[in-house]
Image (cartoon, helix red, strand yellow):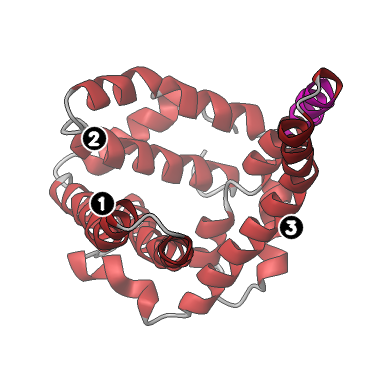
């Protein structure tokens, strides 16, 4: 049975009750680590805005993004453990750095490659439009970007569960993870979209609170997404 957004949120709150400290602390540390590692490269690019520094900054951003995926997967691992009433600890945040991090990195590189290929025609047209400075090129560019978004949005929801599957199915190949996520998300894309949309107000208030509110909203959103995943695979009904 497909649980509603309200029911999934209720389940998330129940699993977080009395356990909020761990996911909140793990969420904060995740954000601080990513911010701290990025900061020197961002500052260097601003202080020395040349092509070499730009390339270094872009390469560093890619590497940091890949490592942050491994770290964020550890955060999801904690949330899954809470949902399943398993014993979890703060050290689990770094669990996948020693448990097949290559699978998470490869999956992310594949994702980047697919998105790059999907966006390539629109990006090329954008460059031509800017160089030509012709209205016909800009119209063509706008049309191609619209079609690109039409492809990208469903694709983003089709792969919504890949990191959960990487966590739960350590022997599953990356290609199988993508295929399984797409299979599971059939008929569930709109539900995932609605769940994300339901957090818009909370997220906006968190931003207005200078990000402090994210310490509560972030774990709540993650836990709700975990409950959605468990419902999709039939673990909870």
Q: Nearer the viewer, residue 179 or 41?
A: 41
Please give the count of numbered marks on the rendered protein.
3
* Crowd band around label 2 with a 10 angstrom C-alpha radius: few (<14), some (14–19), many (20+): many
Could you say where residue 113 lies in the image, as x and y percent from the top left?
Answer: 68, 60
Vertical arrangement, residue 154 with respect to residue 61, above or below: above
Q: Residues within 10 Å of mark 1 (few under 14, many from 20)?
A: few
Give the distance between the C-alpha atoms of the residues marked 3 and 2, in whole angstroms. 32 Å
Please name which of the two marks, 3 or 2, marks the residue nearer to the observer: 2
Q: Can you give x and y, in whole percent of width and height, for residue 147 in the image?
A: 80, 30
Query: Which residue is tagged 3?
Result: 179
Q: What label sits on residue 214 in the rendered view? A: 2
Left or right: residue 187 versus residue 60 is right
- Residue at screen point 67% across, 34% down: 153
Of pointers 3 and 1, the one earlier in the residue sequence: 1
- Residue 164 on image: x %, y %: 51, 57
- Frontmost residue, 46 versus 193: 46
| Mark earlier in primary sequence (3, 2) | 3
Q: Residue at x 23, y 42 (%)?
A: 16
Q: Quadrant of residue 191?
A: top right
Identify residue for label 1. Answer: 31
Image quadrant of residue 152? top right
Q: Secondary structure at mark 3?
A: helix
Quadrant into which the N terminus falls: top right
Q: Image point 37% across, 29% down: which residue?
A: 9
Magenta stretch mostly in which secondary structure? helix
Q: Position of residue 200 (x, y in %)?
A: 39, 21
| Region in magenta | 137-148
Label 2 – label 1 distance at C-alpha: 10 Å
Q: What residue appears at the point 74 percent right and 36 percent down from the top-left corner? A: 131
């Amino acid at each position: 049975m497909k649980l509603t957004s309200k029911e999934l949120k209720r389940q998330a709150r129940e699993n977080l009750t009395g356990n909020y400290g761990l996911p909140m602390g793990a969420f904060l540390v995740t954000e601080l680590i990513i911010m701290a590692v990025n900061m020197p490269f961002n500052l260097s690019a601003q202080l020395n805005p040349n092509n070499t520094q730009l390339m270094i900054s872009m390469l560093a951003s890619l590497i940091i993004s890949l490592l942050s995926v491994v770290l964020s997967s550890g955060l999801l691992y904690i949330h899954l453990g809470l949902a399943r009433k398993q014993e979890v600890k703060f050290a689990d945040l770094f669990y996948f750095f020693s448990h097949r991090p290559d699978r998470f990195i490869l999956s992310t590189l594949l994702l980047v490659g697919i998105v790059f290929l999907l966006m390539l025609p629109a990006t090329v047209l954008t460059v031509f439009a800017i160089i030509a400075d012709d209205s016909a090129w800009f119209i063509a560019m706008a049309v191609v970007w619209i079609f690109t978004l039409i492809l990208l949005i469903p694709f983003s929801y089709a792969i919504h569960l890949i990191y959960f599957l990487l966590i739960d199915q350590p022997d599953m190949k990356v290609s199988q993870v993508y295929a399984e996520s797409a299979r599971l998300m059939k008929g569930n894309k709109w539900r995932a979209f609605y769940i994300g949309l339901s957090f818009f107000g909370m997220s906006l208030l968190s931003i207005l609170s200078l990000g402090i509110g994210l310490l509560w909203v972030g774990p709540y959103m993650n836990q709700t997404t975990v409950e959605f995943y468990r419902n999709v695979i039939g673990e909870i009904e």
